Amino acid sequence: MKLFSSPQLQQVILDGNAFNGTLDLGRSISSELSMVSFKDNDFSSVTVTSSYNGTLALAGNPVCDHLPNTAYCNVTQHAPSPAYTTSLVKCFSGACPPEQSMSPQSCGCAYPYQGVMYFRAPFFADVGNGTAFQELESKLWTKLELSPGSVALQDPFFNSDSYMQVQVKLFPSGGPYFNRTEVMRIGFDLSNQTFKPPKEFGPYYFIASPYPFPDRNGPASKSKGAIIGIAVGCGVLLIALVGAAVYAFMQRRRAQKATEELGGPFGVVGSERGAGRRAAAERGEVVLVRGAEAEHQQLRGGQRAGVRRVRQGVQGHAAQRAVHRHQEGAARFHAGRARVQDRDRAALPGAPQEPRRPRRLLLRAGRADARLRVHVRRHAARQPHREERPASRLEEAAPGGAGRGPRPRLPA
């Protein structure tokens, strides 16, 4: 049959079908073919050539009724080769803490970035093929920019969907952890299939496991410097809080003491203690005011005594002139104050108003020319007309006042 002559064919598994007649593998069988399985079919005979050295499984076919002791009809075939696992022979046989694994490169414990690769159609079926899996390891650390030997593969097998499932662990080279940037880059390359495996593995998809970053491992992952800094900061904060509480308590005690001395915030009506304290406070204010007045009176008395001594000639000539100027200034001040008071009284409603006297013009002899007469005429025309008031008793009694009449106006 030409079915078994394909040069890349490695396994043929057609169990549980209704094939019947004679199974003939033919003369040209591929050298890569390692397993042919036709279990639970209806083959009545089989033809096998000596060029095929692989496994043939025919259990459950009618042909096994005639050949019960042959290897083809034995239900328990020979055990397959063990699955491939990255070798850790050069590392000591020590145990790592939980969530850590031993790196095949440094033989030290670290937190790997791990997940499962599902190969949907690999071109081989031997999960113990060390050559193929070592090629996969080499391509992983090369394309993902990791250190050589920092990739570990474990327990490849075929699941119920006939997908080859491989556990993959990628180890950091600079410490026990990958940083976030490296995890994002590696996860992107594998999840989006930017990484291309060897051709014999075919298409794949990758499912990653959550990565335990340092901040998720509790206090053990923090450095000593961070722990010391946190402890110092907490101590300083505690001291500051205690100091603030003590200061607030002292201020409260002072406020309470002052309130008690004054008889409460609003006083106590009918309380002898509060009334006595308020009376004492008022007496204190009166004493202060009286003391200030006595001091002021003493100062003024000293100034007056100095003035008297100046008047008596105790001081010199300069002091006498100063006193004279002071007396003149005082007289001018009292005269001005009297004028202001008279003007204010006259401005009150109902106060008697004095008649406004016309302005007097002084005519010098020999200057009564035409221009002056014009100005005098204009000035007389602007003056309002006033009625003549009768002479008062004082004017009549005054000498020369009986026959006085209104003042004659200047001739125009």
Image: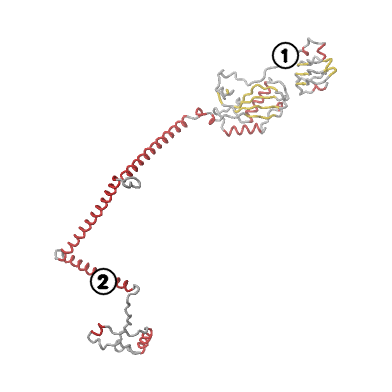
Task: Give, as a three-letter code, the residue at label 1.
Answer: His
Judge by depth and name the residue closer to the eye, 349 or 332.
349
- What kind of element bears circle 2? helix
**Which residue does the numbered mark 2 point to in the structure image?**
335
Figure quadrant of residue 97? top right
Q: Residues within 10 Å of mark 1 (few under 14, many from 20)?
A: few
Q: Position of residue 62 (x, y in %)?
A: 82, 14
**Which residue does the numbered mark 1 point to in the structure image?**
78
Task: Give, as a three-letter code, the residue at label 2.
Answer: Ala
Residue at position x 70%, y 16% from top? 80
**Rendered position, 198 above or below 359:** above
* In the displayed structure image, the side of residue 307 where residue 201 appears, left or right: right
* Residue at the top extreme, as displayed: 69
Where is the C terminus found, in terms of image quarters? bottom left
- What kind of element bears circle 1? loop
Judge by depth and name the residue closer to the eye, 71 or 16.
16
* In the displayed structure image, the side of residue 75 where residue 287 appears, left or right: left
Figure quadrant of residue 164? top right
Disc tally is: 2
**Rendered position, 22 above or below 201:** above
Residue at position x 73%, y 26% from top? 121
